[in-house]
Image (cartoon, helix red, strand yellow):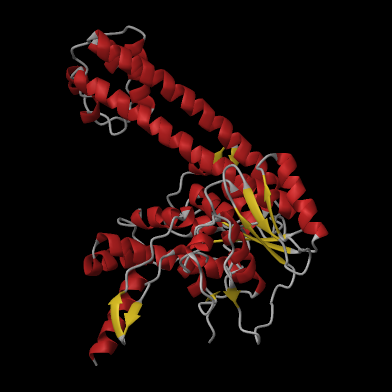
Amino acid sequence: MPLLGRNHNQPMSKKTSKRKHQSKNIVIAPDWEPVNAHAAGVDIGSREHWVCAPQQATGSNVRQFGTFTADLEAIADWLKACGATSVAMEATGVYWIPLFQVLERCGFQVILVNARQTKNVAGRKSDVQDCQWIQRLHTYGLLQGSFRPEDPYCVLRTYLRYRDELVGARSTQCQHMQKALQQMNIQLTQVLSDVAGVSGLAIIGAIVGGQRDPVQLAAMVHRSVRASAATIQQALKGDYREEHLFVLRQAYELYQTYDGKINGCDEQIARETANLPGRVDPTLKPLPARKEGRKPFLDKMGGQDMRQRLYEKFGVDLTAIEGIGVLTGLVLLTEVGPNVSRFKSEKHFCSWLGLCPDNRISGGKVLSSKTRRVVNRATDALRMAASTLERSQSALGGFYRRMKARLGAAEGVTATAHKLARIIYRLIKHGETYVRQGMEDYEKKFRERKLNALK
């Protein structure tokens, strides 16, 4: 196949090669037919965007624009005047988002391209050459757009990602509180499983308020705590130094602040989820029963039953799967959406998630089969869901423990997350109801398979 690149038969002088914006001759075989005849390419920057319009549109098809909103609108107007209908751009930080949204709102077909697809050819270092190269590759259909859910789900995704950042900031303040308590030799972690629980926050709030009596502090512990009152009183005797009390007070106040912000974010997420289109009418197809052992308050967010909302949006109850909760369902809704038709099969879906082997073969020999490194929140959520199945008395729990014993902890989590991804893909695509398999049935079928293999 003819290669794309500069015409090496033409000599290049040093003066020409040193010009910053001198474009190189890119040779395309004459028998190649354009796939996107009205394609445009954009090189994204923090201060300026370089745009290359279709070559047959104008004499000078490369222009430089700023990054203000008026400049983005000018890009859309100029591309319309040039007859462009499809635009390709690189995923550069977060600088592509405003232009992507403006062009999409103006009716262009916009594809977001991974930089690895456009930087494989050496020598194209300037912004002018980059936008021309992107436009040329997009014209001949050599670029594959990254997956991005529809805009309403991207809106909800923004709220959910910000909530994750708030939760991380709150966790940091919890660590500060634990460190301050440890430095004052208040061994609260030895008598409470969660310092940030109801009992822990009540005791810390009283300490910040000036209470030092261990008896009074121990009386605030919830009755469900297993430690005895005498042990709790001993744990609450400490050296209340002023500098550590100051750190504890600051961390406690920030923890309460972040907790309030998270609650406000939960309310906004609940409202935005309600505005999304539904795929099933719960009056005609009622929500299945909650899985055994699942407490109802765990499905609440912002005062709303998010399990019901997710069922209406997906058309199936994903929380019926062992290890999948409301937060994992929300991550899948915002990162993937309720429609998996963009993925041809469950294999393509798992490949996009980075949960399948990435075989590197040279000379017929497999050099490596490790999974690809991907930055995907849906993948992280599925890995977290898989790690919670270690003590689950279900078929998925038995599968995870068997994979962990055979492959190791990390590979076992990956294998179980891969199995969860295949189940989720089938449920969403076919609208099926998840049928739980008990531990006994799983072990019985596993023994039968082993016996058949031995025979």
Question: As displayed, is residue 420 above or below residue 211?
Answer: below
User: Which corner quadrant of the image does residue 147 belong to?
Assistant: bottom right
Furthest-bottom residue in this view: 455
Looking at the picture, does residue 121 appear above or below residue 283? below
Quadrant hosting residue 281: bottom right
Q: Position of residue 66 (x, y in %)?
A: 66, 43
Considering depth in this image, is 206 or 8 the residue closer to the camera? 8
Question: Residue 445: where, in percent of width, then height?
Answer: 34, 78
Residue 347 location in percent, x, y? 48, 74
Which quarter of the picture shows residue 229? top left
Residue 341 seen from this side: no
Name the residue located 46 percent from the left edge and 68 percent from the top edge.
Answer: 120
* Residue 197 locus on image (x, y percent): 37, 29
Q: Is residue 325 above or below residue 257?
A: below
Q: Residue at x 58, y 43 (%)?
A: 158
Please state if 185 lies on the left or on the right of 353 as rendered. left
Residue at 57 percent across and 60 percent down: it is: 130
Residue 281 in sight from this viewpoint: yes
Q: Is residue 443 left or right of residue 266?
A: left
Residue sitting nearer the eye, 69 or 279: 69
